[in-house]
Image (cartoon, rainbow, N blue to C red):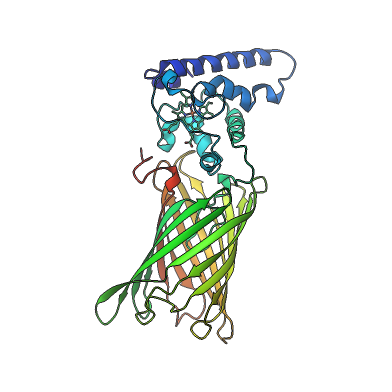
Amino acid sequence: MLRSLIVVTQPIPIALRCASFCLSVLMASAATAQAQPMPVPSHARSGADIYRAGCITCHGADGRGGDQALLGFDNDLPNFTECDFSTPEPDSDWLAIIHEGGTVRGFSQRMPAFKDLLSDREIEAVVGYLRGFCEARGWPLGDLNLPRPLFTEKAFPENEFLLTTTVDHGARAAVGDSLLYERRLGSRAQYEISVPINVQKGSGSWTPGLGDVTLAFKRVLHGNRTRGRIVSAGTEVLLPTGSELRGFGRGVTIVEPFVVAGQMLPSDGFVQMHVGAELPTDTAKAGRELFVRAAAGKSVMEGRWGRAWTPMVELLGAHEFGHSEPTAWDIVPQLQVTLSRRQHIMISGGLKFPLNERDERKSEFVSYFLWDWLDGGLFDGWK
Ligand code: HEC
């Protein structure tokens, strides 16, 4: 217990000595209580007790961060009352930081490790207490932010940058890069803009061009952490900014209403669904289409708190109305992995295989680079 605290104590003696001292007193009192024949009530060391004894010096009674002048360091302290910052954080990140100290997620070593002072249950209890600082209702918790599949949209509202690359070996070889910017609006909504740049092989040479820009808006309809479920609905509008002649665009505005849902499963498993319709404003140019996308996967951590590996498989179905062609089905095995210690930068890659009509539809390689920018800059949180 002392060792882990002393390591980080030297630069900031006042705060840590107090944290260490207060917790020791608390532990001693718990130990005395245990020595008595009466069973210790499970609420003996509640999240509030632990926070008061071990966290309050630095994080402040109100959760907004203590006075830095008194603490003797100038690290910014998190403000747990800001729901837009605190609610998207998954429990697993906070459990890791409290257990191992700030460095486990690329934060400052000023945030000490509590693994030798607190049991897992107590760390969970204090995370529960931290959650209470956001008083507004309606903010879905970060645990419902399930890993992003390559095609199935997520229900959780995000602050992200995503660069997707698609390599197509079809009749006209093509590489498509699409830059997606997602921004959260308040507790439940999000908008996004996607700008695709395509490069296509024509007669011998590769030509670049802008594809169809899309704008989208979605809103969480239902989010329940206890049930592990989140449902959102929204609309995407595809604008015909890409040249149809050069094969870069659809040549028509398409409105796409959709519903997305995510369900957490035991042991970091999950399923996600995305159902919608593509409704072109001019049906002479493109047909109406109904689509269903489903993803299932499971995250596995390296060690207890390390890198997350998430193998997933997606099934994609698309049916065009008014055509005799059957529903097109594809399967997409893929793997997502977090790169930064902060877990805010990740990559994913997979292969999309057609399950039917294989003569006309070729397989595609799809990958993305994802940056959850609310959690830190591109170069923050790596060590
Ligand atoms: C010695 C001061 C100190 C003590 C004591 C302390 N913390 Fe911290 N904590 C920090 C600092 C500083 C940061 C910010 C680190 C950064 O941003 O690099 C932090 C960050 C955190 C974070 C991460 C928030 C985020 O950005 O996602 C959590 C969670 C946290 N502390 C919880 C606790 C809990 C719970 C306790 C008590 C059991 C505690 N801290 C005790 C200094 C402290």
- Residue lying at the far left of the rendered structure: 205
For this view, does 357 lie left or right of residue 364? right
Residue nearest the observer in this picture, 333 or 278 = 278
Res. 307 visible in picture? no
For this view, does 349 lie left or right of residue 234? left
Please, is residue 329 above or below residue 106 in the view?
Answer: below
Q: Quadrant of the C terminus?
A: top left
Res. 128 visible in picture? yes
Q: Residue at x 48, y 63 (%)?
A: 333
Please, is residue 244 above or below residue 353 in the view?
Answer: below
Please, is residue 307 above or below residue 356 in the view?
Answer: above
Image coordinates of residue 259 in percent, x first then y, are: 60, 63
Image coordinates of residue 4 in percent, x first then y, are: 44, 22
Q: Residue at x 39, y 44 (%)?
A: 340
For this view, does 308 lie left or right of residue 209? right
Residue nearest the observer in this picture, 362 or 187 = 187
Image coordinates of residue 119 in percent, x first then y, are: 58, 27
Image coordinates of residue 172 in percent, x first then y, are: 35, 79
Q: How many marks?
A: 0
Snapshot quadrant of residue 142: top right
Q: Residue at x 36, y 46 (%)?
A: 378
Q: Residue at x 42, y 68 (%)?
A: 213
